[in-house]
Amino acid sequence: MTEVFTILQSAIYEISTFMLYPVMVILLGLVTWSIIELGGFVFEFRFRDRDLKRMEHGALMARKSLWGGDPIGAVRVMAENGSNYFVHNFIKDLQNCVGNSSELRAVKVEKLIQDYETAMQRRLEKTRFLTRAGPMFGLMGTLIPMGPALMGLIRGDVEALANNLVIAFGTTVVGLMAGVTGFMVSMVRSRWYRQDMSDIQYISEVMFGDFTSESGMDASLSDLSEPASYATPNIPSNIPLSSDERNPKIGGIIRTVAMRLGESVYYTLFFTPTRLIVAKTAGSLFASPLIFMSLVISVDALAIGARVFEIAIPFSYLVLINSVICAALIAVIRVSRVHAGKKSDQLMHLHPDEILTSDAANREISYQDIVCIEVTRRWYNRAVKVLTKNDQWIDLGCIERSQLNSIGIINATLPGRIIER
């Protein structure tokens, strides 16, 4: 019986001791993750903007456009008065719902609201995991070295005792730091997203809700005038007009990002009645993950090379430098996305020909020249390529994660030409 107990005790001791290094690696990963999430939280806080009166005014104007039979104009008006990230993207995705019958539209709007609620929960799950996993792994990192520390105390090995206690207390601090960061970010973001969901439901109710004349909605709408940007220009009758000029409305947009010679380039795909316009909205060499990956490798290589000259760089400093580089990459990517989104919103109000000439990198593809559109599914995005009649493949980049449900725009514009892989 004693031998069985000894075997079990030795097995548990070996397993727990073996888990020490994986736990330490996981804790370092959690700390890096918490720093990245904290950087994203600060960035999100910096760009949050909510004006309830402006949003309400935009919703009323959009409802008036809907009643006037202009659903695309309604989405445009509402997009100008959107506020935060989720609300702004929700308004853009409404363009897939406004053209349907009232019954189908209500179902699609409700489904869209549920999708955004799920997206908010998914984003909160990341920091909530930090809140729970950080202290748990910190506790594991505290208890695991206690066994070797006690064994060292029995043998009189004070150095082994001290080293194991340092690891035990250090992992506790690291785990608690990751947990506190995740708890703070989760708490504030939960309040933000509850407010965003309330705004989304409010916009949906104002735009698509069933109001009667007794509610005073008719009187409010009658006092509103159409914005000047949607006025029809006076064009001389002797100038021949293309179909785009006769109908300059844009049926939908999709934002993509692609790598071009090491540079991250952001595009917006504008679907007009007769052609697809690919417009460059942002581009930055510093937003490329390859640049920051090269920087991380260079820093680590220098640290390894320094040991040849007996220059020891503390491991904690190296982790901190790599974490700062990763946080800088996240910040640059998000800034580029915000800039691309603002440029896309500006181009939305231009005539298709003006969009085409706004940048030398912009191009157009006639729907008649498109044989098929290949959409390759990946776990984090969708890659889009176009095959033209001259057997040329045109890479349109990858659809951003926030717009993965916008494939319906391509299906509605070019039915039967999509090949999904």
Image (spheres, rainbow, N blue to C red):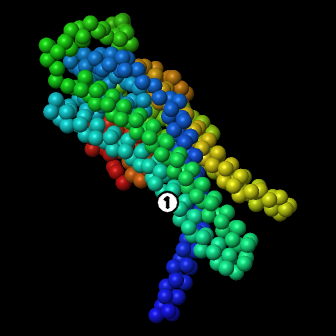
Q: Residue visible at 58% across and 58% down?
A: 172
Q: Residue visible at 83% across and 58% down?
A: 311
The image position of residue 349, as x and y in percent, is 41, 20
Q: Residue visible at 23% across and 8% down?
A: 222
Q: Which residue is mark 1?
A: 136
The image position of residue 169, as x and y in percent, is 62, 60
Instruction: Tell me, yes or no, if residue 281 can be seen here.
Output: no
Say which quarter of the image contains residue 38.
Answer: top right
On the picture, is 373 further left or further right than 162? left
On the picture, is 53 further left or further right than 108? right
Q: Residue visible at 20% across and 32% down?
A: 105
Callout 1: few (<14), some (14-19), or many (20+) C-alpha neighbours within 10 Å?
some
Vertical order, 230 against 355 (above or below): above
**Residue toward you, 402 or 155:** 155
Q: Residue furthest right?
A: 309
The image position of residue 97, as x and y in percent, is 25, 32
- Quarter holding the C terminus is bottom left
Say which quarter of the image contains residue 361.
Answer: top right
**Residue toward you, 186 or 80:** 186
Q: Amino acid at mark 1?
A: Met
Question: Under tag 1, what secondary structure?
Answer: helix
Say which quarter of the image contains residue 175.
Answer: bottom right
**Residue toward you, 376 or 118:** 118
Instruction: Tell me, yes or no, if residue 52 can be seen here.
Output: yes
The image position of residue 34, as x and y in percent, is 55, 48
Label total for image: 1
